[in-house]
Amino acid sequence: MRIVDLIERKRDGGTHSAAELQALIGGYVRGEVPDYQMAAWLMAVCWRGMTPEEATSLTQLMAASGEQLDLSSIGRPVADKHSTGGVGDKTSLVVMPLVAACGVPVGKMSGRGLGFTGGTIDKLECFPNIRLDLSAAEFVRQLGEVGIVITGQSADLAPADGKLYALRDVTGTVPSLPLIASSVMSKKLAAGAQVIVLDVKTGSGAFMREPEAARALAEAMVEIGTQAGRRTAAVVSDMSQPLGRAVGNALEVAEALATLDGHGPPEFTAFALELASLIVELASDGHGGRAAVEAALHSGAAKQAFRRMVEAQGGDSSAFDDPRRLPTAQIQQPLVAEQAGYLVRLDALEVARASIALGAGRERKGDPIDLAVGVVVQAKVGDRLAAGQPIAIVHANDSATLAAAERILRGAIGVASEPVPLPPLIRERIGVPAARPG
Ligand code: URA
């Protein structure tokens, strides 16, 4: 089989068998297929797409290119949750404890924040000494013993995706729906969970800005997961404004802990409860997830599960008793409404840019970040504002970054005399069992 024939076939809109994809991906991982041929094929995929069968084969080949976790020793279906990344997205820190407290083991390998999206791993670093580099054996052991684990993405899982992604990054071939779906799902399949719930964000603060593209990505990933024999479902959720109120690492951890105490922003709490119920229902083949998840929230069992995870990974859990132990910025400056009216725009991307200007995020891989800084919005789209009312509190560690963040935030905000209709936080549900709402 000549690789150039495969490139030409894809260029002309043709399809590949699983064996052909294996020759291509296997050859690339072994170093037999050069970068220039793989880059040409990737660009052809960007233009011509892939069939669901091709995308599933590609995913399975990438998943099989490295270590694949065997979670059979846990004895029950294990759940995993993935978000395509957003602004103020601390959902995993609430959903995973809720799920674990319902007796469903839940484990996740997660990334660091890059660009405008925050990373769960960075947020967890607010607990001093926590280990986020667990080995596969440690990951599986903690799943069995504690029932909840979050660690950094292991390079041993789906190494073919790591190599392909690095090439896509420098050849303009990241934005291909089947390539993104295969990339995400290869890591999920290799991590071994039986239940996979995906949160695909859409809006200005999301990777997929348009709802149609987000829906198509969600459908493609659900199809791949289902074809691979995993119970997979997805929601498409709004990211036109930040999720919840807090944006910034320690601020988001504080909001997650408040939510687990029952004092979270109502719409974020409802969102977390719905995702957790979906996971519990998929894992238990049935219904009644909602009642169990609500009980786990109100009894404090979910917060205990989160604390057990932090402690099992060597982290200092004193912030669970007193959130003031979390990293705190020196300056807390309100940004007030200049006129009365309705908040009609709170652009998620601009809020993220303000937060990055404060030092909460990184432009390049490996950049240091300031865990304490960020923005806590005091109003959401649709709220009525009086002149002088705080729209956000900016948490900064110096006056220069504070001024930069305030400038960016002013551009994030729109105030008008009439309210605008609000999009629902969950725009779509894909692969969700029929008995569920929607
Ligand atoms: N995230 C991934 O893991 N892969 C992609 O291709 C895009 C985003």
Image (cartoon, rainbow, N blue to C red):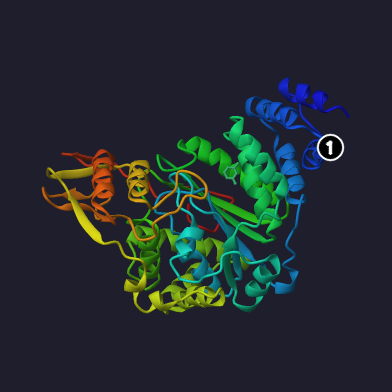
User: Could you tell me which residue is drawn at 68 percent across and 31 percent down?
Assistant: 42
Residue 125 is left or right of residue 193, and the answer is: left
Residue 382 visible? The answer is no
Q: Position of residue 369 (x, y in %)?
A: 42, 54
Please give the residue where the numbered disc 1 appears in the rendered image: 23
Res 261 → quadrant: bottom left
Note whether 59 is above or below 437 in the view shown. above
Quadrant position of the N terminus in the picture: top right
Q: Closest to the observer: 162 or 424?
A: 162
Res 330 → quadrant: bottom left
Q: Closest to the observer: 304 or 138?
A: 138
Q: Position of residue 413 (x, y in %)?
A: 25, 41
Q: Position of residue 297 (x, y in %)?
A: 43, 73
Is label 1 within 8 A of ligand 1 (CB to nearest ligand atom)?
no
**Ligand 1 falls in quadrant:** top right
Residue 256 visible? The answer is yes
Note whether 427 is above or below 71 in the view shown. above
Note whether 85 is above or below 173 in the view shown. below
**Mark 1 secondary-structure assignment:** helix
Q: Which residue occupies the extreme right position in the image? A: 1
How many labels sit on residues?
Answer: 1
Res 104 → quadrant: bottom right
User: Could you tell me which residue is drawn at 54 percent across and 61 percent down?
Assistant: 278
User: Could you tell me which residue is drawn at 66 percent across and 43 percent down?
Assistant: 182
Q: Amino acid at mark 1?
A: Ala
* Number of residues whose C-alpha sits closer than 10 Å to that of mark 1, classed few (under 14), some (14–19) or many (20 or more): some
Residue 435 is left or right of residue 272, and the answer is: right
Q: Position of residue 102 (x, y in %)?
A: 54, 74
